[in-house]
């Protein structure tokens, strides 16, 4: 044990890592991802930055969250195209650093006050049920286990890493600025995909002329990225004193809502409408200003596009074909749940069985269509117990928020706005996941779900501890520093 502590102590140090070092490391990682995306030799560039990045990650595990959030939406590719950056960013970075952080905790190398909760027990139960389901019912267990690891387990590991590291306000601000940068990139890519698609790489134009997907290849994860960044900006706007910074954050929020408007995804529009309603309840002044600015920006965008965007938006609202297809498919999913409520039909098997169970719904004929409802697809494939365990952390944290609200919000002025913002972002995610099967289609979209839950859980646990029990930081005990 002593040898392990001394070995780990060589990597660990004070959490006060200089900002230039963090910025330089993230910049190097972004450069590697960009060069790799342009077809350059990936291995050479990865090796060039591997050593400084590994040292930084071991000394400061929160950097893993920043790298994952900053790189995955931009450079990680889809299934069947697993390059070195996909393995490092999308598959290894967060799970490995979670194990490292837990090892520090068990070896006494960090003074984190992480404790297991009912949400963690439910998550563990869900993972066990899902993996057993794959082994029993999947046609190709190895392939489905790999898909489950990529799309579900890695995002859950992100939640775990946030829980164990427990970011403080300064560290959350790093995440805020990173999300703002990502928000602006996605909004710019989304606008250019309609106004000047020729300037964008072909891999970002998979649905050009139909939906706005940014760099994340789907309207739901695209709008969820904008919404999570916008809500964090609103939270920090409440505690910023500088007028200029408040105006800048407000501008970012307005840009996000315009980006959601041009997604032409009705589920995203519904989610944004629900968030706006929540803002009118909790942040009325911001909501009124946002509506005015948003309306002006949308009008300006419609004028720039010569009315094409407004016309297409009207066509989307009047289009009933996709809505009918989803209703028929959702009805088939409900029938699948009724037939096998406990174990389901097997992870990844929805498309194998749903067509045979489709029937006419009212005036809508049975028609082909893939799963577009995260929760129904989850229950149809894995059973109702798995769905209940997956949803339990949300319900439990909401109950905990209501129970501890006064105690938590009195501890820090940021806690209240941040909790409201993250729950509004969760409301958007819940709505869009009723229009898209996020678990199978987007690792990044699912990661945003668990990112919000992780931040909520950290705020609740840190804000409800006794005053004398505060997180000292990731510091090595004195004997190991000698």
Image: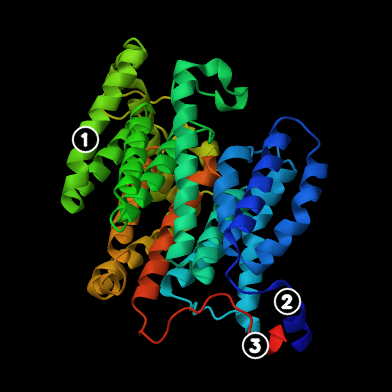
| Mark-to-mark CA distance, 2 and 1 | 52 Å
Q: Residue furthest top?
A: 306
Q: Position of residue 427 (x, y in %)?
A: 31, 49
Image quarter (top left, top right, bottom left or bottom right) of the N terminus: bottom right
The image's mark for residue 8 is: 2
Q: Earlier in the sequence, mark 2 or mark 1?
A: 2
Give the labeled residue for mark 3: 478
| Mark-to-mark CA distance, 3 and 2 | 14 Å
Q: Position of residue 330 (x, y in %)?
A: 37, 38
| Residue depicted at 35% across the width and 21% down the height | 321
| Residue depicted at 61% across the width and 24% down the height | 201
Image quarter (top left, top right, bottom left or bottom right) of the C terminus: bottom right
Q: Secondary structure at mark 3?
A: helix
Q: Quadrant of residue 17?
A: bottom right
Left or right: residue 90 versus residue 375 is right
**Vertical position of residue 55 compared to residue 183: above or below:** below
Judge by depth and name the residue closer to the eye, 63 or 137.
63
Q: Earlier in the sequence, mark 3 or mark 2?
A: 2
How packed mark 2 is, by other alpha carbons closer than 10 Å (few <14, some 14-19, many 20 or more), is many
Q: Secondary structure at mark 1?
A: helix
How packed mark 1 is, by other alpha carbons closer than 10 Å (few <14, some 14-19, many 20 or more), is some
**Vertical position of residue 95 compared to residue 436: above or below:** below
Give the labeled residue for mark 1: 291
């Amino acid at each position: 044990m002593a040898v392990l502590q001394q070995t780990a102590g060589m990597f660990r140090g004070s959490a006060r890592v200089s900002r230039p070092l963090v910025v330089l490391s993230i910049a190097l990682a972004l450069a590697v991802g960009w060069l790799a995306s342009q077809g350059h030799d990936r291995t050479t560039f990865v090796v060039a930055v591997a050593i400084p990045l590994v040292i930084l990650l071991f000394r400061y595990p929160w950097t893993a969250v920043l790298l994952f959030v900053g790189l995955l939406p931009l450079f990680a590719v889809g299934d069947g195209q697993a390059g070195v950056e996909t393995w490092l960013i999308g598959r290894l970075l967060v799970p490995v650093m979670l194990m490292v952080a837990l090892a520090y905790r068990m070896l006494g190398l960090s003074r984190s006050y992480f404790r297991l909760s009912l949400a963690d027990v439910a998550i563990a139960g869900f993972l066990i049920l899902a993996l057993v389901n794959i082994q029993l019912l999947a046609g190709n267990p190895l392939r489905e286990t790999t898909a489950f690891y990529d799309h579900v387990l890695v995002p859950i590991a992100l939640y775990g890493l946030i829980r164990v590291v427990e970011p403080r306000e300064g560290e959350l601000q790093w995440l805020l600025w990173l999300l703002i940068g990502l928000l602006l990139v996605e909004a710019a890519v989304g606008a250019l995909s309609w106004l000047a698609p020729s300037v964008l790489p072909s891999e970002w134009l998979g649905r050009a002329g139909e939906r706005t997907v940014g760099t994340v290849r789907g309207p739901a994860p695209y709008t969820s990225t904008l919404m999570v960044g916008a809500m964090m900006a609103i939270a920090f706007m409440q505690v910023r004193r500088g007028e200029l910074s408040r105006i800048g954050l407000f501008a970012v929020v307005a840009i996000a809502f315009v980006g959601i408007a041009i997604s032409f995804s009705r589920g995203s529009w519904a989610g944004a409408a629900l968030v706006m309603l929540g803002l009118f309840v909790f942040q009325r002044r911001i909501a009124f200003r946002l509506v005015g600015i948003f309306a002006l920006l949308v009008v300006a965008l419609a004028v720039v596009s010569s009315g094409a965007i407004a016309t297409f938006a009207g066509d989307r609202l009047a289009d009933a074909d996709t809505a009918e297809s989803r209703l028929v498919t959702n009805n088939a999913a409900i029938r699948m749940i009724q037939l096998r409520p406990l174990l389901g039909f097997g992870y990844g098997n929805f498309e194998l069985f749903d067509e045979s169970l489709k029937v006419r719904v009212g005036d809508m004929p049975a028609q082909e269509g893939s799963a577009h409802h995260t929760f129904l697809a989850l229950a149809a494939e894995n059973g109702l117990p798995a769905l209940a365990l997956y949803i339990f952390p949300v319900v439990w944290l909401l109950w905990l928020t209501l129970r501890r609200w006064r105690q938590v919000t009195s501890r820090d002025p940021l806690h209240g706005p941040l909790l409201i913002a993250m729950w509004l972002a969760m409301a958007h995610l819940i709505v869009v996941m009723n229009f898209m099967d996020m678990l199978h289609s987007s690792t990044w979209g699912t990661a945003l779900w668990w990112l919000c839950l992780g931040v909520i859980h950290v705020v609740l646990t840190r804000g409800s501890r006794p005053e004398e029990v505060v997180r000292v930081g990731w510091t090595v005990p004195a004997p190991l520093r000698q």
